Amino acid sequence: MIGSLASPAHIHDGEGGPLRYAEANKTTIPRWQVGVPPEGLGKGGVVAFTESELIAARTGGLLALGFNEAMRGPLPRSQEVHIALPAYRGKRLVPVLAWLAVERLVVPRGRVAWSMTKQQGPDSVRAVLDGLGWNLDKQRAGRVVRLHGEAPAAAALPLPRGFTADLGRRSGVDLVADYGVFSPDRLDEGTALLLDIALREPPVSRVADIGVGYGALAIGLVLNGIAPSAVGTDVDAIALWLSEENARSNSVPLDLALSSDPMAAAPTPLTVVNVPTHIDAAETAAFMASLVERAQHGRLLIVVHASLEGRYVRYLSSHGPLQRHPGPAHVVLELGSSVGIESRA
Ligand SMILES: C[S@@+](CC[C@H](N)C(=O)[O-])C[C@H]1O[C@@H](n2cnc3c(N)ncnc32)[C@H](O)[C@@H]1O
């Protein structure tokens, strides 16, 4: 049933094979579109890299799911796949998308088109694909370059890059972090400060990590016994995929939502946020208002660079006593409510 796939792209069930995908296998998809191509979306299913792409596809009445869900598969296959190569993700994503196309989306001997701008280096993308057994023709239309041809019979999924981190009392935690996600080489200093402060909190039944990235905070808090499980949100489906992988490899129960709304995760007695500070003023206002709503149900801990403290204090200070926990370069702001706060076990 196609309708079941079009329901909000959320929640990882930990099994890697939701029933809805099996049901969807009975359907045919005329074409899969991975990302939104420069000329806009046509007919067919959409694999979205971001929440905005997911919304654009669903607004157009298309079957759509997040990249993280598509990686989990299986999915109904189509004759044709169009991959709009996302900018700022690096060439290392190309073999991952090649795997997705071959092993999840296209029928044997089906056709795949890759589109990108000249700035994205089509010749080096083609060289990567050549090395993986693809034989592609090249076409140019204005700023857009298209590489197209028959998909090879098989593809291997490369391992993402990663690093080993000390998360509270748990040392040597392996985390994958790649393809342009936030702080890919090491734990961010703000994340480390927030983890340190959150580890002083009493244990709770569940923790939410808003803007979860590759999952360092959520995973660190569960591994240190602050909560038995976590929920995370992010607007970036590649980050969600990595956080799913990290949660699985560290045996951490983590549910995920591809959403810009912090309230997309059900209320929790503790919410942690390493705040995305590059989003625009209107998005920030909506984001902070939704965090304030979360704080009505439990403690909220956010971290920002110390130079930005004033900007975020403004959103929180009229909603209850605000505590600050300064670190060397960042500050954690704490807004707590007695409602929903659980006592020390
Ligand atoms: C500063 S990074 C923190 C990542 C991770 N929590 C960590 O500490 O490593 C902020 C994250 O928020 C995500 N993001 C941006 N806008 C968002 C929104 N409105 N809702 C949820 N996540 C968002 C970004 O994609 C990014 O992964």
Image (cartoon, rainbow, N blue to C red):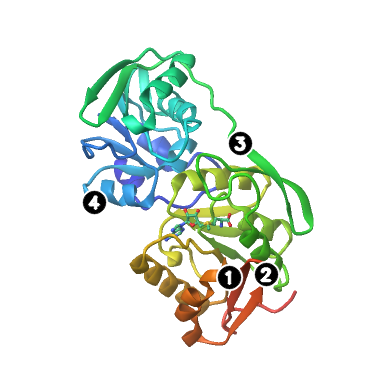
Label 2 Cα neighbours within 10 Å, binned few <14 / some 14-19 / many ≥20: some
In the image shown, does 16 or 224 lie closer to the viewer? 224
What residue type is disc 4 on? Thr
Q: Which residue bears the numbered disc 4?
A: 59
Q: Residue at x 39, y 43 (%)?
A: 49
Lower sequence index among marks 3 and 4: 4
Q: Residue at x 35, y 33 (%)?
A: 119
What residue type is disc 3 on? Arg
Q: Mark 2 and mark 1 in contact? Answer it, CB < 8 Å.
A: yes
Residue 45 image offset from top left, x and y in percent: 29, 37
Q: Residue at x 43, y 63 (%)?
A: 264
Residue 161's disc number: 3
Q: Does dot 2 land on a helix, a strand or a loop?
A: loop
Q: Does dot 4 land on a helix, a strand or a loop?
A: helix
- Does any atom of ligand 1 lie closer than 8 Å to the CB of label 2? no
Residue 113's disc number: none
Judge whether residue 266 can be spotted in this image: yes
Q: Which residue bears the numbered disc 1?
A: 306
Q: Mark 3 and mark 1 in contact? Answer it, CB < 8 Å.
A: no
Lower sequence index among marks 1 and 4: 4
